[in-house]
Amino acid sequence: MSDSSTATIDEPTVTIAPPRKEIAPNASRPATQKQPRYNVILWDDQDHTFAYVIKMMQQLFRKSEHDGKLIAHEVNTTGRAICMTTTKELAELKRDQIHAFGGDPLASRGKGGGSMWASIEPMPG
């Protein structure tokens, strides 16, 4: 072994981050934009029962039985009902799920025809 009484130890390197810029309380900040909202509209027809609409609302929109009944009643009396208000992408998905839900086995016209019709529209405002 050799005598190394003159060994050196490297000093650690410390990096200091520059200070953050403080934003004055009244300084204008860029406005954040919210995504436009869209309504999913369910349209009335004569081929589907209240039970079908309630079941569809429960399965596709996670509505309670009570809320499903309210939507079924609104569709029946006014011809349309808003099922959900959301982003455009999710509204398109929910509309497509309504179209793919299938026929109503309880309908008086045989096998219930097919799925109900839905559309999306921008929320006013």
Image: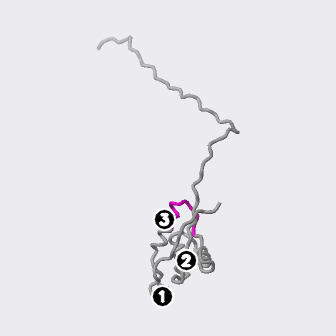
What sort of colour scheme is used for the picture? one colour
Q: Which residue is mark 3?
A: 93
Mark sitting earlier along the chain (3/1): 3
Q: Is residue 85 magenta?
A: yes
Residue 113: image location, x then y, percent: 46, 82
Residue 5: image location, x then y, percent: 38, 11
- Magenta segment boundaries in residue numbering: 83-94
**For mark 3, does the 10 Å Cα neighbourhood hold few (<14), some (14 to 19), or many (20 or more) residues?**
few
Residue in the image at 45% along x and 72% along y: 100
Rounded to the nearest whole Å, what is the CA distance between mark 3 and mark 1?
28 Å
Q: Total number of numbered labels?
A: 3
Using the rendered view, name the quadrant where residue 39 is placed. bottom right
**For mark 1, does the 10 Å Cα neighbourhood hold few (<14), some (14 to 19), or many (20 or more) residues?**
few
**Residue 69 in sight here:** no
Q: Is residue 23 left or right of residue 118?
A: right
Q: Which residue is mark 2?
A: 54
**For mark 2, does the 10 Å Cα neighbourhood hold few (<14), some (14 to 19), or many (20 or more) residues?**
many
What residue type is disc 3 on? Leu
Mark sitting earlier along the chain (2/3): 2
**Secondary element at tag 1:** loop
Question: Which residue is outermost to the right?
Answer: 26
Check contact, mark 2 vs mark 3: CB within 8 A.
no
Q: Which residue is mark 1?
A: 109
Rounded to the nearest whole Å, what is the CA distance between mark 2 and mark 3?
19 Å
Quadrant of image for the C terminus: bottom right
Check contact, mark 2 vs mark 1: CB within 8 A.
no
What residue type is disc 2 on? Ile
Quadrant of image for the N terminus: top left
